[in-house]
Image (cartoon, rainbow, N blue to C red):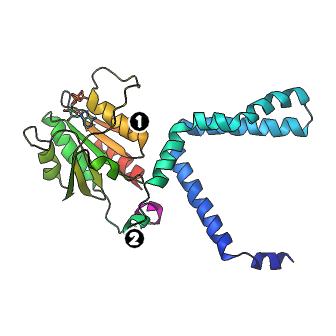
Amino acid sequence: MDNLQFWNFRFIDFVDVFLVAILLYYVYKLVKGTVAINIFIGILVIYIVWLVTDYLNMHLLHRIFDGFMKVGIIALIVVFQPEIRKFLLMVGSTNLGGKKRIFKNFKFLKSDSETTTDIDVIIKACVQMGRNNTGALIVIERNNNLDFLTNTGDEMNISVSQPIIESIFFKNSPLHDGAIIIDNNIVKATRVILPVNNEKNIPNRFGLRHRAAIGITEKTDALALAVSEETGQISYIKNGEFIMYKDMEELINKIKKDLV
Ligand SMILES: Nc1ncnc2c1ncn2[C@@H]1O[C@H](COP(=O)(O)OP(=O)(O)OP(=O)(O)O)[C@@H](O)[C@H]1O
């Protein structure tokens, strides 16, 4: 009988399981390394206590936790608002018009041989720009499509190389203002205006460039590199937070890991 049930496993069940796996994968990617994972654990603990108090007939405690569970879905929406927003953006920015795009949005299916962004070259350019006190703002696209931002600047299609990045941000260059967007080793837009975060408390030495880097990485899953014109310092920003690193080698490794 059990065997029979196993053979009843339909193709649509396989699709169902596959889609749930993709959903879990993206939920994991969204909360990985963020404070959301701790909140998620907190919610899980409350849920377990709720189940246990029900099972043990501990009426008073159960009623208290029952109160939490009843407003649970609203609380979840409030607490996970940024993650839900990112998730919906991820779903909404899946452009099903192009075959390449479909696979691009399922990056975990990518083979190693596919072109990926040359981080070593980007960091070399940042180091050089930092030495010359040339400001720069580089956004690296991940799963969220950033095409909605490209029309704030100029669409481009230039392969990433150290001289290209340095000349874009060269002070007298007509393209130096704003941010550039890199996707799959191609500079796909320059002079892009990013959404600025005005709420976060960040040191005074950081101005709009850094706030823009925080803004875009908060609203999407993109990564940002900001080179300060004043100090030459290179900041790496992910999920709206500055990511600390010891040296350039560690920075390169961190970015490469985040791009897998
Ligand atoms: N919203 C934005 N989107 C894209 N680029 C921006 C945005 N806001 C500012 N910039 C870029 O940042 C440049 C410098 O801005 P600002 O001096 O306020 O930044 P900062 O964080 O203090 O950086 P720095 O340390 O280089 O001075 C601007 O000239 C512009 O090119």
Task: Kindly report the secondary structure that dominates the magenta region of the rendered protein.
Answer: helix
Q: Which amino acid does the dot numbered 1 rest on? A: Gly
The extreme right residue here reads 57
Q: Position of residue 178 (x, y in %)?
A: 22, 39
Helix, strand or loop at mark 1: loop
Left/right of residue 12 with respect to residue 158 in the rendered view: right
Which residue corresponds to the image point at 40% horizontal and 62% vertical from the top-left? 104
Q: Position of residue 109 (x, y in %)?
A: 47, 66
Q: Is residue 197 above or below residue 34?
A: above
- Does the magenta-highlighted stretch encompass residue 106? yes
Q: Disc number at residue 115?
A: none
Label 2 CB sits under 8 Å from any ligand 1 atom: no
Any part of residue 188 in sight: yes
Compare residues 155 and 234 and report the one nearer the observer.
Answer: 155
Q: Is residue 62 above or below residue 180?
A: above
Residue on which disc 1 sits: 240
Compare residues 137 and 242 and report the one nearer the observer.
Answer: 137
Which residue corresponds to the image point at 20% horizontal and 32% vertical from the top-left? 232
For the residues labelled 1 and 2, the Cα–Cα distance comes to: 31 Å
The extreme left residue here reads 172
Q: Is residue 203 above or below residue 245?
A: above
Any part of residue 246 in sight: no
**How dense is the environment of label 1, judged by Cα within 10 Å: few (below 14), some, or many (20 and up)?**
many
Q: Position of residue 107 (x, y in %)?
A: 44, 61
Chain part drawn in magenta: 104-109
Left/right of residue 240 with respect to residue 193 in the rendered view: right
- Kindly indicate the quadrant of the structure image that contains residue 81: top right
How many numbered discs, if any? 2
Residue on which disc 2 sits: 99
Left/right of residue 213 with respect to residue 19 in the rendered view: left
**How dense is the environment of label 2, judged by Cα within 10 Å: few (below 14), some, or many (20 and up)?**
few
Q: Which amino acid does the dot numbered 2 rest on? A: Lys
